[in-house]
Image: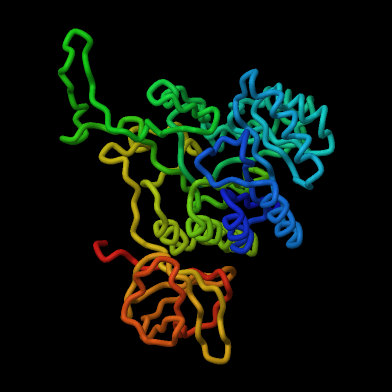
Amino acid sequence: MKKPELLAPGGSLEKLKTAIDYGADAVYIGGEAFSLRAAAENFSRADMIKGLKYAHDRNKKVYLTANIIPHNADIDEFEKFVDEIKDMGFDAVLIADLGLFDIMREKAPHIPIHISTQANNVNYRSAIAWYKMGAKRVVLGREMSFKEIAEFQKKIPQDLELEAFIHGAMCISYSGRCLLSNYMTGRDSNMGACAHPCRWNYKLVEETRPGEYMDVFENERGTFIFNSKDLCTIRHIPELIQSGITSFKIEGRVKTAYYVATVVGAYRREIDRYLADPEGYTFNEEEYEELCKVSHRAYSTGFYFGKPNEEGQVYTSSSYIRNYDLIGIVEAYDEETGTAKVTQRNRFFKGDTVEIMQPEKPYFTQKIEKMTDENGEEIEVANHAEQRLFIPLKQSVVPGAMLRKKRQNE
């Protein structure tokens, strides 16, 4: 049984470091161009160099995402982009377009190429075709079931790697190939600027009755008929590992560092638990509860066990479920005094009960009985953005540990 790679999103240098600290084996990032997440902070050349060093110093990998669907005007710029990054040390580049694939093979033949999910890889013949042209890995479309993946494995070369999404947002369009955003807002989803109109509220209009807006009866406010649930497979680690998938991919380059830490940590622990004792393995329900502490839509298993039915959509709202807030990040910890220096991220009070999470350890809960500002004055509330505080903690923590608090209205 081969240990799968846990692949995490790196929307910024901070998120790359967080993903690696919390257990990712590899991180995928985007540059300031040619990546399908224009809303992410993305990486300058300087940040790429820092991120690559941080990862490689810890024996982790970094993949560069360049999976837009380019037009003629993009080609010359992409060639310049490849010249800039080809000797930086990336472990692979993700490509969706055949023309960009050809440029990569011509200008940077030493960099492995992974074929993006945007290339709609849902049959083994397309995967074999990419392999024959020199691809090392194919990212499967989210529309594939375990049964189809098993058929894939029987047909493809043994050294062709498969990568699949295991957690995160699902797109209503086939492998992300959507024109709805472009049509309604002028923002091209295939160039990284999706406005997510699939999450909007829709009503039905019949062409001979202009002005008559009819609900599609989910509720009195209309319907969110394109609004997919988020993918969550943490209860199915055995099936994922036994499928032979090389890399387990988490979606979310525009998510927060807190999201990355929580999701990566939960999957890391559960994967390791299974590999340590496959025969005696039972799922730890606390890890699913962890995934419910980040901002998310209702969860589903996507296409893995067959095509989703009406249960695969959220009909009542386009809002996220947010039960917890990140309230602070530990900058330093004094072992002698048991005091953490914390940077505030959201308001909290003396007397609040909080959870403290950190890499490679389970979270712990405690009440904040005392906190002081940088002048040593005791305070009752931390309500200034980026405020530095000193808080005694009942367990030792490492820099980067995160404090979170359950919302009062939950």
Up-down relation of residue 158 to residue 72 (above or below): below
Question: Residue 333: image x %, image y %?
Answer: 56, 81
Question: Residue 227: image x %, image y %?
Answer: 36, 35
Of residues 15 and 304, which is closer to you in this image?
A: 15
Whether residue 278 appears in this view of the structure is no
Question: Residue 52: image x %, image y %?
Answer: 72, 53
Total tally of numbered discs in the picture: 0
Up-down relation of residue 21 to residue 85 (above or below): below
Q: Residue furthest front?
A: 375
Of residues 111 and 48, which is closer to you in this image?
A: 48
User: Which quadrant of the structure image shows residue 358?
Assistant: bottom right
Of residues 325 and 276, which is closer to you in this image?
A: 325
Q: Is residue 339 left or right of residue 244?
A: left
Q: Is residue 128 left or right of residue 331?
A: right
Q: Is residue 378 left or right of residue 171?
A: left
Q: Quadrant of the C terminus?
A: bottom left
Q: Residue furthest top?
A: 208
Whether residue 14 appears in this view of the structure is yes
Q: Is residue 184 left or right of residue 271?
A: left
Question: Residue 251: image x %, image y %?
Answer: 53, 45
Q: Which residue is at a point 47% across and 85% down the rendered structure image?
A: 394
Q: Which residue is at a point 49% across and 69% down the rendered structure image?
A: 329
Q: Which residue is at a point 79% across and 47% down the rendered structure image?
A: 89
What colouring style does the render use?
rainbow
Q: Which residue is at a point 58% across and 51% down the rendered structure image?
A: 12
